[in-house]
Amino acid sequence: MPDKCPFCNPDPKKILVANTLCYAIFDRYPVSPGHILVLPFLHFPDYFESTPPEVEAFDALLRRCRTRLGEEYHPDGYNVGVNVGNAAGQTIPHMHIHVIPRYRGDSLHPRGGIRGVIPEKQDY
């Protein structure tokens, strides 16, 4: 566990939902209202190092987060994504999954969704 990892010692008051292997918190720099991060308690850098039980735990929390967001924020859609490595934009080397609620009108051109990480490839 790196000394300065902001995700290794979560504040229990900020945890929205959790299970034995992972937890969810609101993103400190949200892309949209309700933006959530799902993270493992154990420190490792990326999704591809997850064990099968961790993947199951992430999926369970993703579904719980979707339910909560639907009840509290009423989004029109979602983007779910993981940045793996610097080239993909990962800034904190502690695996985390973004759950980004989307709302009609929050983007002029939402077509292509996650493909927008490379803007010229988004609209096809």
Image (tube, rainbow, N blue to C red):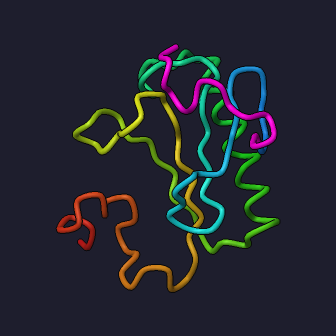
Task: Using the image, determine if residue 52 lies above or below residue 71.
Answer: above
Q: Which residue is drawn at the image coordinates 52% and 36% (left, top)?
A: 96
Q: Nearer the viewer, residue 46 or 55?
A: 46
Residue at point 51%, 20% (across, down): 50
Report x, y in % for residue 24. 68, 40
- Was residue 3 drawn as part of the magenta stretch in this picture? yes
Magenta range is 1-15
Q: Does residue 34 appear left or right of residue 17 in this picture?
A: left
Relative horizontal placement of residue 5, taking residue 37 as reference (left or right): left
Q: Quadrant of residue 66?
A: bottom right
Q: Position of residue 18 (x, y in %)?
A: 77, 33
Q: How many discs appear?
A: 0
Residue 82 shown left or right of residue 87 in the figure: right
| Residue 6 included in the magenta stretch of the image | yes
Expressed as whole percent of the image width and height from the top left, the position of residue 10 reads 68, 31
Residue at the (26%, 36%) spot, across then down: 86
Q: Which quarter of the rendered picture does the C terminus lie within? A: bottom left
Residue ranking furthest to the left: 120
x, y percentage for residue 47? 45, 28
Q: Main secondary structure of the magenta part?
A: loop
**Of 8 and 78, which appears nearest the observer?**
8
Q: Is residue 118 left or right of residue 96?
A: left
Compared with 64, 67 (above or below) is: below
- Identify which residue, 120 or 42, lies in the foreground: 42
Question: Residue at point 42% right, 23% down?
Answer: 45
Which quadrant would residue 40 be assigned to in this image? top right
